[in-house]
Image (cartoon, rainbow, N blue to C red):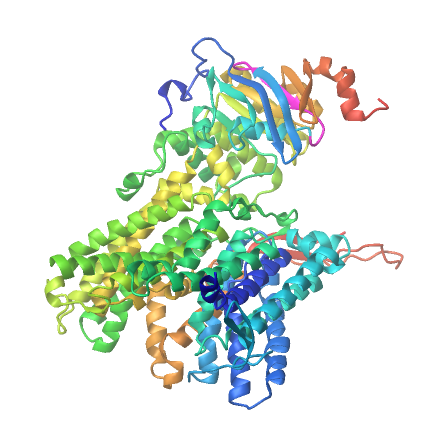
Amino acid sequence: MEHFLGFAIPGIPYGCTYAIVAVGLVLTYQATGVFNFAFGAQAYTSAFVYTKLVQNEQLPVWLAFLLSVVILAPLLGLIFDRYLFRKIPNTNTTAKLVTGISLFVGIPALLPVLFGSQNQYNSPSILFDPNTVYFRVAQTPVNGIYLSSVVVTAVVLVALVVLMRFTNLGLQMRGAVESRRLVQLDGVNSGRVIATAWAVSSLLAGLAGVLLAPIYGQLQAQDYATLLVAAFAAAAWAALRSFPIAALVGILMGVADTVLQGYLPATSSLSAAVLPSLPFIVLVLALLLVPGMRKLHDDSDPLSSVDPPPPPTTASLRAPQLSRVIRIAWYVLLAAFIVSMLSWMPKTWESVFNSGLAFSTIFLSITLITGMGGQLSLAQATLAGVGAFTAAQLANHLGLNFLAGAVVGAILAAAVAVILALASLRLKGLGLALMTIAAALFFDNSIFSEIGVSHGVALTVANKWVGLGILNANGHNLFIMLMIVLVICLAAVTLVGNGTTGRFLAAQRGSETAAAGIGINITWQRIQIFALSGAVAGIGGTMLVIQQQTVNAMQFNYQLGLAFVVIVITTGVSAIEGAIQAGMGYVVVQQVLTYLPARYGGNGLTFVLFAAGALTYVAHPEGILEYQKRRWTMRFQRLILPGSSSGPPTPPMPGSDNGAKPPISVPSLDGPFTGVAATEGGGP
Amino acid sequence: MRVPKVFRSPSTGPPIEGPDGSPLLAVAGVTKSFGGIAAVRDVSFTVETGESVGLVGPNGAGKTTLFNCICGQLQPEDGRVELKGTTLGRLPTFQRARLGIGRTYQRVEVFADMTVREHLLVAERARCADGQLLRDLANRSRPTSAEITRVGEVLDLVGIADRAEAPVSALGLGSCRLVELARALVAEPCLLLADEPSSGLDLTETQELANVLRTLQRERGMAVLLVEHDLHMVAEVVDRTIVMDLGAVIAQGTFDEVMADTNVRHAYLGTSA
């Protein structure tokens, strides 16, 4: 028993922080309907600022805690609520997820840009001295870190249960999550209720952040992402409802981790495979076994009919003449691009654009699964990795040509995608997002890192494995190959989008109930689109490693997968050209930023820029680029085709003859819904 | 699972009957509870080929739940649903649709990204096959002239041909209900489950809808199971009426018979009636 406790007790501080974050996730979900992907980023921000204030600014611990946790953390939550999440209709799960993911990607990338990227070590403990042993349990010393985490977790848990169960505010929070507009009709200030929930849950994020900081030697955003996934698993077992279950599972996961570390041989392959995957296995089991997680998408707002319909695509608004002009302009641009790449383009930029072509192919898989299929998959980088690693393994071990390997890799990636689709048949929205992120993390930690390419060492893609002079530095064969592959994938995606599958998927996006009711096999459609998306991602992944001439796990980690989704959504996920704009935009922005000082270069600021773009998803779910295109198209169209301008002149304000004010008056109202006039000059 | 050819809805003419002259639809002892509340309790009735049956009752009587059990969106805890003598069991919704059960919804369910015509083209394609990826990739998925003609006929029948190219997001509730009806009809169901189809329609539109339903029933032999609160429309359209209250059938018969029933008056008007 003492042996067991010796392994278990060190897991308690981890478990307690998992528990606090899980409880915070449950609180945010219970009160606002948002599954806050940004929670880890919020925790990291508070920990980052707290450590910075204590170590760089020499502030006392209590003051740093006050500023970073009590003030900054709730302030962040209030900003997120006021400017982002409050604008999202209750039923729009995708917008909530995309916004959270954008913050998850953007905030940790922004902090080094703002404050510099120097490492931070040894954050101080907030309550008790980490170096003092206060007492022993079964011979195991309990120091300040253990004590702080247990005390804080207990206090938080009791306070939250009391808040939600026994206070008027808790009751209002539970009402507001169903429909903030409905509780407003009952006289409740739902805005204030939800803001309070955001402030409290963000305080918990900050608290978890500074509690965890002393446990890790070095402060790294990556650790907070892992913390978040562990908390996802705990919250999922609680079906995003029960604080005690979320806390209990969080603590058990922390304990199980250290107990398994203790009992499993450190060098065994079982240990290497199981330990890093524990949170993902627990999360997947919760998604498969907890009935409440399968019913998350059943949330509905009784007043959802007041929300505007989705905006039409730019292409559907264009006059046929303008569409012809734009099509010709695209062909001219494409021809100019090809000629430039084959003639005068500097090698640096040729390489940049080649990389853009490979990324565009990968991003097409996101257009397929998210734009057409209406499913938010966060594992597209992983599927690209499956394709790339397969081709690399076949080349390395069997000497197979990379292009042939790309086909095998695409088949394998499609197979993995089908398994993912089958495992998540009953999930969509948040559930599917969690399942795919769990799969991505599983591949990161247990497969890509283990199989590597050559005993875990990055492999250089050799000329002999590609052939056809594709990797010759002085030729353009690589560009030609990437163009051909992209055009084939584009053609396939376009045909599917315009074909029966595309129309069935559009029907499913509109109403799964009605789609099934007219005879569409929802399951089969889903499996098909996952398979095709996986295949395209796999091909894109292989193209990327051929272009970069190296294969390693970092090219396809789950954070890149999240960033990919953010990038494509920024440029427009519903239109096929959105993938090209995303691929080219990503590499061009990255390249341009290299001309800035080192602090601003690399992926960091690129991710920040695209995450900022994706935050506009709330207002423009078609993508900010697509929105601007539609805006300018309409302006241009009105300019060259004056007859297309719409809207009657506004009638005069209604007034009463005798000067007495009517009990209610409706001055002329115009209510446009993304271009479609819902009310025009409404009066009494 | 492939749908047996014998059960496929014919493209023209009256629907195929069951192999042994069994009723088109038989609901036998269906029970469905949510938590501790019995939404449908031991409900049994039949609908014959070409018959129009009204299913009425106050709000919360279990009518829509029963519809969901018939078309497979809910699985009853007890009892069975048979179509043409074959027990549907756990057959999923899409296969029941291909067997000939069409449906409109109490809360309008339309495909927001599509025009009216596209709705019908999708429904026409869906009744025959799953999305065929390989045909799409070979660019062989364009609507055929037969499909376009068929869709045009249904648009004319329901009276929404003038709105065929309009996106449904730009239509009002009444028009969306007609789109739903047309979408269900294009698949030529042998049984149409119409859930409050007149909700949101004005008097003229309701009258036109009633005419359409009568035409389909009498000229094409399509059976209709109609949930409706507009009792005038029910009286005009149905051959027989079933009244439900608190999950159970409380009366069956002609419209006039059930309206004179004490239990029905009690259910609608309370104890003082």
- x and y, in percent, of residue A613 in the image: 47, 68
Quarter-of-image position of residue A402: bottom left
- x and y, in percent, of residue A344 in the image: 20, 76
Front-lying residue, B116 or A74: A74
- x and y, in percent, of residue A575 in the image: 40, 55
Residue at position x 39%, y 64% from top?
A261
Asked if the magenta segment contains residue B53, the reply would be: yes
Asked if the magenta segment contains residue B249, the reply would be: no
Front-lying residue, A400 or B7: A400
Q: Is residue A374 visible?
A: yes
Image quadrant containing the C terminus of chain B: top right
State the residue lying farthest toward the top.
B20
Front-lying residue, A95 or A319: A95
Specify whether B47 is left or right of B38: left
Residue at position x 38%, y 61% from top?
A263
Q: Is residue A318 visible?
A: no
- x and y, in percent, of residue B84 in the image: 47, 16
Vertical arrangement, residue A489 with respect to residue A160, above or below:
above
Task: Look at the image and give the residue range highlighted in magenta.
Answer: B47-60
Specify whether A491 is left or right of A215: left
